[in-house]
Amino acid sequence: MRALTQLAACSLILLLAACSSAPRHRPPIVYPELSQEQSADIAVHALGLVGTPYRYGGNTPEGGFDCSGLIGYVYRLRAGIAPPRTTAELGDFGHSVGAGELRTGDLVIFGRFRPTHAGIYVGDGRFVHAPSTGGEVRLDRLSSAYWSRQPVAFRRP
C-alpha cells in the first residue's frame, strides 16, 4: 500500500512538472516613432512635474513619483505609450540612440551593466527625473559633476 502511495505521489509530481514550462519569449512591443509634437509634449509635461515629491513606487502627481513611475505617467498621458514599470526593463525599451541623435522626449538611462536610474531628456543637455527618497522631481544637466561621471544610454520608443 505504501509503494502505491509513493507511486501516486511521484506520478502527481511528474504531471505537475510537465504542466510547467519555461516562459515563452515575447517579442518586444513596437510603437510608432514619436512625432516631434509628441516629443515636445512629453518634455513640457515632464518639466511641469518638477517639484513633485519623490516616492518609491509612486506613479502619480498626487502620490509622488519614482523615476520609472514619472516616465510611465508622462508617456501614457502624452503619447499613449505604456513603458515598462521598472528601471531595469526601461534599458530595453524602444531603441538605442546616440548622444548626437538625442531629442526631447527620449529616455536617459543610467547604469553600467543594469539600469539603475532614468529620466526624460528635455533638450539643451538637461533631463527631468525623480532622484531619490526625500527629494523631488527635478531638472538636471547631463554635464553636471555627478551625472557626467555616470554611465549613460539613450532610448527612444
Image (cartoon, rainbow, N blue to C red):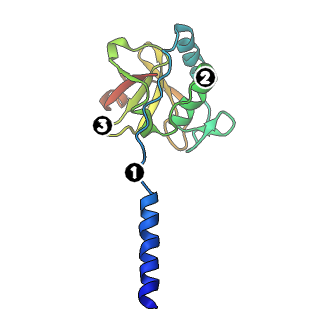
Marker count (numbered): 3
Residue 83 is situated, as x and y percent measured from the top left of the image, at: 52, 31
Residue 31 is situated, as x and y percent measured from the top left of the image, at: 50, 21
Question: Residue at 31% across / 31% down in the picture?
Answer: 151
Residue 22 is tagged as 1
Q: Nearer the viewer, residue 93 or 56?
A: 93
Left or right: where does residue 34 sit relative to residue 155? right
Left or right: where does residue 107 sit relative to residue 148? right
Cα distance in 3D space between marks 2 and 1:
31 Å
Name the residue furthest top: 36
**Sequence-first disc among 2 and 3:** 2
**Sequence-first disc among 1 and 3:** 1
What amino acid type is highlighted by mark number 2? Answer: Gly
Residue 59 is situated, as x and y percent measured from the top left of the image, at: 61, 37
Cα distance in 3D space between marks 1 and 3:
28 Å
Give the residue pinned by disc 3.
Answer: 112
Q: Nearer the viewer, residue 102 or 10?
A: 10
Under circle 2, the secondary element is loop
> Where is residue 14, by image quadrant?
bottom left
Question: Residue at 52% across / 38% down in the picture?
Answer: 85
Residue 94 is tagged as none
Give the residue pinned by disc 2.
Answer: 80
What amino acid type is highlighted by mark number 3? Answer: Arg
How packed mark 1 is, by other alpha carbons closer than 10 Å (few <14, some 14-19, many 20 or more), is few
Q: Nearer the viewer, mark 1 or mark 3?
A: 1
Above or below, comparing residue 45 to residue 114 in the picture: above
Q: Nearer the viewer, mark 2 or mark 3?
A: 2
Q: Is residue 137 visible?
A: no
